[in-house]
Amino acid sequence: MKTQPTTGKVNTAGFSECRCPNCNRLLFKGRVKYVEIQCPKCRLVQTIKKGRSLRLVALNPSNVDLYYAAGGQLIGRPSTTALPSDLLEKIKDVPEVGETPCPNIDQIIALKPDLVLAADTHVKQPTLSTLEKAGIPVYRQRLDSFQEISQALRFYGELADRPGQANEVIDRLDSKLQQAQERSKNKPSPRVLTVWGSLEKLYMALPNSFTGDLISRLNALNVAGDSDNPATQYAPLTLEFALQADPDLILLINHSDEAKVGDKIRNELMLHPAWQKLKAVQQNQVYQLPYQLFAVNPASRADMAIDFLSNLFYPEPHY
């Protein structure tokens, strides 16, 4: 082991902090393969190996999914049902810190995390300011495209010291996308309208949304067009626009995980006299998208979202 001279200051920029898991006292900064150390404050003895797990809290379901897919574990997570049952079972004992739009700041601070993971579009400035004053950094990231899922997985794999596991997930997702793109070759591009909300207040998914990004990657045409603001993911939808666009398929994103809510919206739209003028309605090409794959970013399950859309856009012929 190379030692530093006793005079002058050691540049510790980029070094990891090691804190006592009992009282959170800073024990040292550096890079180690193995060390046994006793906290001078509470006398707890701990063994630390290379890649010691960081204390992380996630505020968004997609952050939770991606961090566990990359091999990590959390000390705090959001209150949510927008995750698959196997992952919910895995994290059932992880302390909840409230719902994504309004997390419990005091509870987060009490957990003494090294870092908080948050989706850029969901975390509010008062939350950021309070955590910053408490000395807790927040890593904000956009998760609005397929490419951003891969970027997050790669980063999380480094945080969890499991880059190989993260790369396996990335390869799986990339392979599924390539298969779906091959399936779309030499086939007509369907014209698609993705709708969010209710008949009283409808929005359409723009290319900047996650669903809009997948539509484009699968060589379909999003009739909603582009937005002047790259941060805008949804825009108000009027019946006049829908009639003018006259899409081949209409996709419905439900704002609730209750199937009966989605069925109600679909039935109302199919039976509405004005909407019955649309080709997609006349040909029964109106589909309810699975809540856990499209209401939130599907994260490591993006391959399932790709499969679902690909089967709608390019169905296999029936003989």
Image (tube, rainbow, N blue to C red):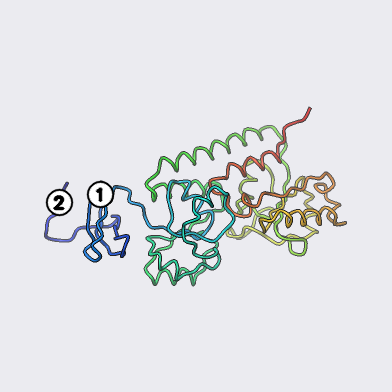
Identify residue type, mark 1.
Val
Q: Residue furthest top?
A: 319
| 39 versus 125 height, above or below | above
Using the image as rendered, state which of residue 298 and residue 225 is in the foreground. Answer: 298
Left or right: where does residue 238 sit relative to residue 257? right
Q: Which quadrant does the C terminus fall into?
A: top right
Question: Where is residue 55 drawn, in percent x and y?
Answer: 38, 58
Left or right: where does residue 298 sit relative to residue 71? right
Question: Callout 1 environment at 10 Å: few (<14), some (14 to 19), or many (20+)?
Answer: few
The structure residue drawn at horizontal position 49% and vertical position 59%, both measured from the top left corner, is 77
The image's mark for residue 32 is 1
Give the foreground label among 1 and 2: 1
| Count of marks placed on residues | 2
Using the image as rendered, state which of residue 188 and residue 128 is in the foreground. Answer: 128
Element carrying mark 2:
loop
Element carrying mark 1:
loop
The residue indicated by pointer 2 is 3
Mark 2 or mark 1, which is nearer the start of the sequence?
2
Using the image as rendered, state which of residue 91 and residue 101 is in the foreground. Answer: 91
Question: Where is residue 191 drawn, in percent x and y?
Answer: 73, 45
Left or right: where does residue 112 sit relative to residue 193? left
Question: Where is residue 99 drawn, in percent x and y?
Answer: 55, 64
Q: Residue furthest left?
A: 6
Identify residue type, mark 2.
Thr
